[in-house]
Image: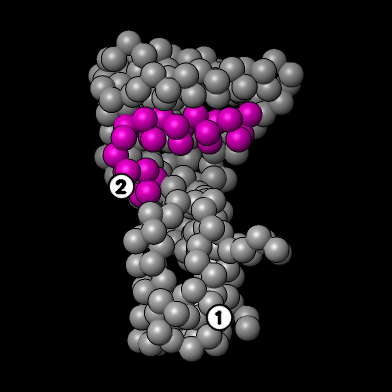
Amino acid sequence: MCLKAVLLEAGSTKFQSILLRIHEVIDEEGLKPGDRIPSERELVSRLQVGRSTVREALRALELLGIITTRRGQGTFLQPYRSHRLVELLAFYILRDETARDNLLEMRMLLETGAVRLAALRAREEDLHALEGIWSAMKKKVLAGEVPVEEDYEFHRRMVQSSHNHLLLRVWYPVIQYGQTVRENSLNRCGRPQQALQEHRDILDAIRERNPRVAERRLEAHLSVAGFFRVGGQGYRET
């Protein structure tokens, strides 16, 4: 079944109901990305629906990148950042210039709020993780490489350190929509070295439990990275 057909079928009330019931099972089990979900046979039994219906629902979720099947192991939840649904939405949303500006502003608002909370709530394991990510970033920069993945991981862990689960869930698709902005920024001449120091300064402010300084440093970092205010209407890529 092609992706277009899946999306069209997903519009039916019956299909939506099955997808929602599968989601409820996942929620009841307390499953997280990387965890194995109940088998097709288990879902048929629990949902009291036909096997073909469950199979088509699982196929739709797999095509969207929400789950993945590993031969001989079962079906697993994918990390939020790998969802093809994000790619599909981004294709339509980012065709509009105003939406792109809103997206950049949204990231600024989410992350400045998150870093304030992180400065107040970060635990020792959060600080340790951020230090490790920064060290990995430094290693790549010194090797002349662009630390795209480390940059992502630093911001993800920073938001996670806010210990606001909903904030983290909202952040995932926003950062994925803006992935191109991040990669273009880090590829600018001299930018990796500058970004390394900016991340160090942000981490130091979090460690010092200073939310105002942490917010100010993060806003400066995002501004240099490609976000700046335009007449009070948002942020644009430089």
Few, some or many residues within 10 Å of mark 2 (<14, 14–19, 20+): few
Relative vertical location of residue 72 with respect to residue 208 in this rendering, above or below: below
Distance, label 2 to label 1, CA atoms, is 30 Å
Front in this rendered view, residue 96 or 136: 136
Relative vertical location of residue 100 with respect to residue 115 in this rendering, above or below: below
**Residue 19 x %, y %:** 41, 75
Which residue lies at the image location 28% right of the left edge and 25% below the top edge?
A: 121
**Residue 33 x %, y %:** 49, 51
Q: Please state the extent of the stretch shown in magenta in the rendering.
A: 147-171
**Residue 87 x %, y %:** 54, 60
Earlier in the chain: of badge 2 and badge 1, it is: 1
Q: Main secondary structure of the magenta part?
A: helix
Residue type, numbered disc 2: Leu
Front in this rendered view, residue 186 or 74: 74
Which image quadrant for residue 192? top right
Where does label 1 land, which residue? 55
Q: Using the image, tell me which numbered label, if any, was put on residue 174.
A: none
Which residue lies at the image location 36% right of the left edge and 80% below the top edge?
A: 17
Few, some or many residues within 10 Å of mark 1 (<14, 14–19, 20+): some
Q: Secondary structure at mark 1?
A: helix
Q: Is residue 118 left or right of residue 64?
A: left
Which residue lies at the image location 43% right of the left edge and 55% below the top edge?
A: 31
Which residue lies at the image location 52% right of the left edge and 33% below the top edge?
A: 153
Which image quadrant for residue 141? top right
Where does label 2 land, which residue? 166
